[in-house]
Structure formats: structure tokens, C-alpha cells
Image (spheres, rainbow, N blue to C red):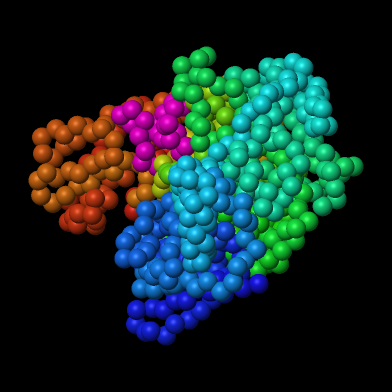
């Protein structure tokens, strides 16, 4: 039944248009999912919300860039304002006015201001006309009959704007039920159970089934469409432990129409496609750690990433009209699009979720979509899901058991507005959510971004297999193995990632030298220079055997799958002798031993993207050099290079005497003499000709 009608016109015309307002919430904005779409550059993706109840119609500025003008005054963002009769609203170049038609079936109990939602991420709409007159009349009657006390007691509640009830507050923990040390099963009175199978190696796991209540605001939003059938359940490990081994959470499915849902980080809701089996939903849950930083001096974990919680929901009989609606998202994709489906319903207006049709990859994000992606983010997110599915299919083909994602073993991707780079959880956590910045979504079609995802998804698999407490994951030979193995995974997925590795890390420094020069198995916290070692390790993973092969490709896969570290003394020795093959590789030649069929990156033909450089110029100062601090000028025409090379390391140096330097300076050619101290082996390549082999002399 039509109760309100919205009239609007743009400033270049007085041609009023009208839209019926037939439901309690109504959205206005530039994105295609809004109820009223305003194609205006001054209008934000999600600009404003309208909400109708017995008091009239409220308006809410969704923290828009250019604001909402009501009666000539800009209203406060993120606060509800009750409109008065025939009040003009200005959004961008559009003027709007809401007209009352007839009383509607909107809930009269909403006169309790605490009953209004705190946030309406997807705008809806409403106005207030006769309701205001009615309320004032009712207040006058109360004054006459009950005196001033009644007016003072009730009128402020009737006229106040909706109160903020946090929708995204995480669940509140009630208690936890420990599983016996070393594994076992625990079950609560509602039939929810956790089964822990201990790992084949590593310390004994001490896990607990944690039970929590939803926040008031979150429950209110969910119950617009679903009956909440359970508490929110998560799995917790004690400090210093990790998520290896097997964890299975089972929740009863009260009816065939029930769904398992997840709350990622306590705020992102997703309706899962996990099927019920024998009346239960079975899930491999993400894990959290009890972590106060006391044992290793590190900071406590942040509140932003709460444990992933699972709960059971059943659609309400009176909410059949609320369906998973892809149209509310800024995308031309439909509900039956082969590439993805919305994993939230129209009622949920706080965060967004999109998944693949198989129900194995889920992407979550908030309403802070960058303006340049406002109309295309769903296309990019769909491409991201497809890329992740493609990479995991490739790794599954390589026989990684952790790559066997399923409707009971999902990958959760969280797009984090403030993130600078992709990462798995936070230090000290064992949840395996992958957090990515919008920049990666924006550039998902590029090789560099695809390589980043290929790298991070190896870390995702490693998280399931390795013991990664804080001390081990921050600075150790094990970290060298884990991080360089992630790079190798990307090389195998697409050899263009080798080129990306050279460009990204080929000139990074460790101490006074290059990462190339360092010995293996060193890794410091927040240090990325040794990612370049992945090239040498990659060349040593080969099938031929012999002194140049640290292991075969299948042995490399089995090491990761078993959570083991295969870099024993014999493997390290094989890595070290492959310095020769890396030298040939960097000169654009195929290795003669080890991985003889390795693809040669294009940048090795010039050497411009990696290593140190030394350029001879035609005027003083005659020498230009970098990127390290290993150069000392001797007069104006001589430089001393002291490049210490660790065992198994290499030192690439490009010397030019003409053309354009890496610094962009045009140079005329002058002759130069390169003297190399007797002792170390070195390989030389002049111009684009063949390398001259081992030119060392003693």
C-alpha cells in the first residue's frame, strides 16, 4: 500500500518526478543499488537514508561528501533528523520533498527512540507530515488530562531522533568449554560440538568452544529477516599455540530451511552455502588465540579482528519478500550470474558480502568504497573471486591438501580500507582470513596483483599446516622458508611473477648490501629484502637430483603439506652451490644445472631492474652509482666497491658508459676499466652478447 510519495527535480528543470515509498526504509545515492539513483557527481555512492515509523519520516546522512541540506541547513552526518511537513531536501543538484498520502502499516512501537537502527548502510526513506500534528495534538491532550508531568515525561521521547545502537558491536562472550588437552570432543546443552584431532607434530593443542551472545543492534538487524536459532560459536586456542591439526565445529540445523551464517571479525555477516548433513552443519572454523603478549613481549592483538563466529539462522515466515538481492549492489550482475552471488540479504545494510557460485570463496567489505570504484567495485570483486578460485585450483592440481576448499572449508577475504598491503590475520592470530586493501581490488587484472594473491594464498595454506606462534613467525630461518616458499608458489602459478620478484626486490637492501648478497636462512621482522632468495631456491627445486637440487617439486609440496622445514644442511649446501646458476640466470642464460628449464625473465637482458649500478659520465663527477652504500669515491674518476657476499649469495653489478642511467641522466660514452679482486668467481656479459662464463682468476 502506498503511504508516502517522494517528489524530486534537478536544478536545470522544474519538471517534478515522483517515486512511491512503499516500505519502511528507502535509499538515495549515486550507486545503482539505491531505491532512488541520482546520477550526479556531487552525490555519494551511498548518500542518504529515509526511514518511516509512526512518528513520521526521518532522514539520515550516510557520511556523504557533500552532505544533505534540509530546510536550507546542512544536517549532521550519521544522525537521524525528523522531517517536518513539506520540508525541502537538497542532495547535490536535486531538490526532494516527501508527501503524505495515507497512514501506513509501519510499527507504532518505534516511538521508542532506542528501537531505531543506528546505521542504515543501504539507505531507505520516510517523511513526517500528519504524524507531527497528531503527536502534538496527543501531547496537548496529555497536558490537559494528566498535567505538565506527563508532557515532560513523554514528549521528549516522541520527538527525539533515533538513538545509536551499535549494529557492528561484536558478540559478547558468555563462557568457553575446553576440549581435553591433546584433542577430543566437547558438546554443550544445545547439541553444538567441537572435535579436535591433534597434529602429527608440534605441541599439544588446548582448544575451547567459545559461546557468545549477539549485540542488541546486530540481533535486531538480523531478525528483520531471520530467526536466530543459536548462540554465536567460535574456537579459541591458548597463548603460544596454533591452528595445526584438525578442528570441526558442528551446529544443529533445526529445519531444512535453516542456514549456517558466519560473522567475520565480529562484524561482516555472510550466509553460507554449507549444507546440513544428518541434521548438522559441519564447518572447519577459523581460530583465535588467547594472547596478552606476556610471553614474548609483543603487543596484544587488536580489537578490530575478533574471532570468526558461526550461528544458525532460519528465514522468518513473514519475510519471504526479503531475498538475496544482487541488484542492491553496484553491479550489472544478476542473481543467477555464473560468477557470483550475494551472501547477504536486503535487510543487512551494515556490510557487504559476495561469493562464488560454489560457496567456497567469500569476500566481505564495508561501505567505504573508494569513489573511483563506486560503480564498478562488484565487477572487480567478482574478478577477485575468480582469480582466487583459479589460483586455488592450480594449487590443488599441485597436490596441496589445504587447497581443497569446499562449502565447509571456505576462504574469507576482507577488503580493509586502511590496509597498505595484503596479509593473513594479524601477528599472533591463527584465523586464516586474508585482508586486502582496495588497491588490490582496483588492480586485480594486473599480473602484479595476481602474483600477490598467488603468494598470499600459499601463506593461507601454510597457516593451516605450520606451527606459527609469534616468536617463530617473526624472525627465524623458518620464516625465510615460509616466505620464500610463498614466492615460489607464485612463480609456479605464473612465471611472470619471477619478473615481478626481480623488479620488486632486486634492488632492496639488507644492511649495507643487497638482499642478493646475504646468506640464506636469515629473516628479520618486517624485512622483505630476502624475498629475492626465492629465485635461487626456485632454481634449486628440480627433478634431476644431484648436488644442485635441494628437493623435487613434489618434495617441496609435501614439506608444506606436512608443516615441515626441509632446509637441512644438505639442502642448504645445494642452495649455496646454485649461486652459480642464479648468476647465469641473472645474465639471461639458462642454468646448466638444477632447474635447467627455468623461464628467463625479460629484464635479465638489460639488467636494469635489479642489482647495483655504476655509470660512467662524460663530465665531473664522472661516476654515478647505487643502490647500496658499498661505493666509496676515490678522487673524481675512481670508485671503490666493497661488496661483501655471504656464503651462497651473489652480487649483480651493471656497469654502463653511455645511454641513459637508471637515474634518467643521458651520458656520452667514455672508456672505463673494471678491476675485480682475485678470488671470487664471477660471470661477465657485455651488451646483449653471450655471457663469458666463469671469469674468476686467482
Q: Nearer the viewer, residue 679 or 560?
A: 560
User: Please, is residue 378 above or below residue 202 in the view?
Assistant: below
Q: Is residue 85 visible?
A: yes
598 lies above or below 50: above
Residue 83: give x, y in percent of width and height. Answer: 44, 62
Quadrant housing the N terminus = bottom right
* Relative side of 282 to 641, left or right: right
Please report the bounds of the magenta region as a residue range.
Answer: 506-532
Residue at x 31% of width, y 45% of height = 654
Q: Position of residue 587 (x, y in %)?
A: 42, 47
Q: Quadrant of the C terminus?
A: top left
Asked where in the image residue 42 lies, by quadrant, the reply is: bottom left
Residue 248 in percent (x, y) is at 77, 33
Find out whether residue 450 is within the magenta segment: no
**Residue at far right of view:** 278
Query: Picture coordinates of residue 538 (x, y %)?
Result: 56, 40
Q: Does the magenta portion include 518?
A: yes
Q: Is residue 370 visible?
A: no
Along the horizontal axis of the image, is 533 left or right of 276?
Answer: left
Q: Which residue is pictured at 40% across the width and 58% down the height?
A: 64
Instruction: Classify 583 as above or below 566.
Output: below
Question: Residue 468 lies in what quarter of the image?
Answer: top right
Residue at 37 percent of width and 45 percent of height: 610
Can you name the residue that lies furthest to the front here? Answer: 145
Picture mark count: 0
Amino acid at each position: 500500500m502506498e503511504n508516502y510519495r517522494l517528489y524530486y527535480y534537478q536544478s536545470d528543470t522544474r519538471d517534478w518526478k515522483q517515486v512511491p515509498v512503499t516500505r519502511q526504509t528507502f535509499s538515495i545515492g549515486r550507486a545503482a543499488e539505491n531505491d532512488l539513483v541520482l546520477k550526479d557527481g556531487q552525490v555519494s555512492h551511498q548518500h542518504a537514508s529515509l526511514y518511516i515509523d509512526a512518528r513520521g519520516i526521518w532522514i539520515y546522512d550516510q557520511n556523504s561528501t557533500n552532505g544533505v541540506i534540509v530546510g536550507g541547513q546542512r544536517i549532521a552526518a550519521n544522525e537521524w533528523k525528523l522531517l517536518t511537513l513539506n520540508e525541502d531536501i537538497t542532495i547535490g543538484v536535486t531538490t526532494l520533498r516527501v508527501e503524505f498520502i495515507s497512514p501506513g502499516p509501519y510499527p507504532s512501537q518505534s516511538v521508542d527512540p532506542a528501537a531505531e537502527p543506528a546505521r542504515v548502510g543501504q539507505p531507505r526513506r520516510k517523511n513526517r507530515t500528519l504524524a507531527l500534528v497528531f503527536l502534538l495534538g496527543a501531547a496537548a491532550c496529555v497536558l490537559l488530562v494528566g498535567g505538565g508531568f506527563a508532557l515532560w515525561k513523554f514528549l521528549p521521547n516522541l520527538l527525539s531522533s533515533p538513538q545509536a545502537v551499535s549494529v557492528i558491536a561484536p558478540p559478547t562472550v558468555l563462557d568457553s568449554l575446553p576440549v581435553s588437552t591433546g584433542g577430543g570432543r566437547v558438546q554443550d546443552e544445545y547439541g553444538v560440538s567441537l572435535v579436535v584431532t591433534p597434529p602429527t607434530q608440534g605441541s599439544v593443542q588446548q582448544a575451547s568452544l567459545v559461546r557468545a551472545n549477539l549485540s542488541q543492534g546486530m540481533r535486531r538487524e538480523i531478525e528483520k529477516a531471520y530467526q536466530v536459532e543459536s548462540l554465536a560459536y567460535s574456537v579459541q586456542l591458548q597463548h603460544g599455540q596454533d591452528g595445526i591439526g584438525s578442528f570441526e565445529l558442528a551446529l544443529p540445523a533445526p529445519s531444512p530451511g535453516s542456514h549456517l551464517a558466519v560473522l567475520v571479525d565480529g562484524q561482516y555477516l555472510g550466509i553460507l552455502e554449507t549444507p546440513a548433513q544428518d541434521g548438522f552443519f559441519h564447518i572447519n572454523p577459523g581460530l583465535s588465540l588467547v594472547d596478552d603478549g606476556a610471553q614474548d613481549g609483543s603487543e596484544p592483538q587488536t580489537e578490530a579482528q575478533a574471532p570468526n563466529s558461526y550461528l544458525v539462522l532460519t528465514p522468518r515466515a513473514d519475510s519471504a519478500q526479503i531475498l538475496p538481492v544482487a541488484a542492491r549492489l553496484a553491479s550489472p550482475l544478476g542473481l543467477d550470474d555464473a560468477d557470483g552471488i550475494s551472501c547477504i540479504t536486503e535487510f543487512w545494510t551494515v556490510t557487504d558480502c559476495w561469493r562464488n557460485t560454489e560457496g567456497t570463496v567469500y569476500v566481505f567489505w564495508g561501505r567505504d568504497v573508494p569513489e573511483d570504484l563506486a560503480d564498478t567495485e562488484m565487477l572487480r570483486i567478482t574478478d577477485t573471486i575468480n582469480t582466487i578460485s583459479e589460483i586455488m585450483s592450480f594449487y590443488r592440481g599441485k597436490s596441496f591438501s589445504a587447497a581443497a576448499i569446499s562449502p565447509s572449508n571456505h576462504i574469507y577475504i576482507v577488503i580493509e580500507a586502511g590496509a597498505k598491503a595484503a596479509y593473513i590475520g594479524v601477528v599472533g592470530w591463527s584465523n586464516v582470513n586474508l585482508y586486502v586493501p582496495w588497491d588490490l581490488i582496483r588492480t586485480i587484472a594486473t599480473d602484479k596483483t595476481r602474483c600477490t594473491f598467488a603468494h598470499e594464498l600459499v601463506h593461507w595454506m601454510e597457516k593451516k599446516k605450520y606451527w606459527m606462534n609469534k616468536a617463530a613467525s617473526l624472525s627465524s630461518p623458518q620464516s625465510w622458508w615460509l616466505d620464500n616458499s610463498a614466492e615460489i608458489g607464485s612463480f609456479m602459478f605464473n612465471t611472470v611473477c619471477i619478473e615481478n620478484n626481480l623488479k620488486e626486490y632486486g634492488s632492496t637492501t639488507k644492511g649495507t648490501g643487497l638482499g642478493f648478497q646475504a646468506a640464506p636462512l636469515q629473516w628479520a621482522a618486517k624485512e622483505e629484502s630476502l624475498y629475492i632468495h626465492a629465485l635461487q631456491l626456485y632454481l634449486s627445486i628440480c627433478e634431476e637430483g644431484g648436488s644442485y637440487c635441494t628437493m623435487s617439486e613434489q618434495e617441496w609440496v609435501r614439506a608444506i603439506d606436512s608443516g615441515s622445514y626441509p632446509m637441512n644442511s644438505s639442502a642448504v649446501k645445494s642452495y649455496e652451490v646454485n649461486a652459480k646458476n642464479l648468476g647465469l640466470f641473472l645474465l639471461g642464460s639458462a642454468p646448466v644445472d638444477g632447474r635447467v628449464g627455468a623461464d628467463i625473465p625479460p629484464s635479465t637482458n638489460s639488467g636494469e631492474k635489479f642489482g647495483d649500478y655504476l655509470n660512467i659520465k662524460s663530465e665531473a663527477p664522472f661516476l654515478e652509482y647505487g643502490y647500496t652504500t658499498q661505493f666509496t669515491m676515490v678522487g673524481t674518476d675512481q670508485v671503490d666497491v666493497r661488496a661483501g657476499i655471504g656464503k651462497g649469495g651473489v652480487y649483480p653489478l651493471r656497469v654502463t658508459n653511455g645511454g641513459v642511467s637508471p637515474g634518467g641522466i643521458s651520458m656520452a660514452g667514455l672508456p672505463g676499466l673494471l678491476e675485480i679482486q682475485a678470488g671470487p668467481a664471477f660471470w661477465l656479459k657485455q651488451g646483449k652478447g653471450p655471457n663469458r662464463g666463469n671469469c674468476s682468476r686467482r
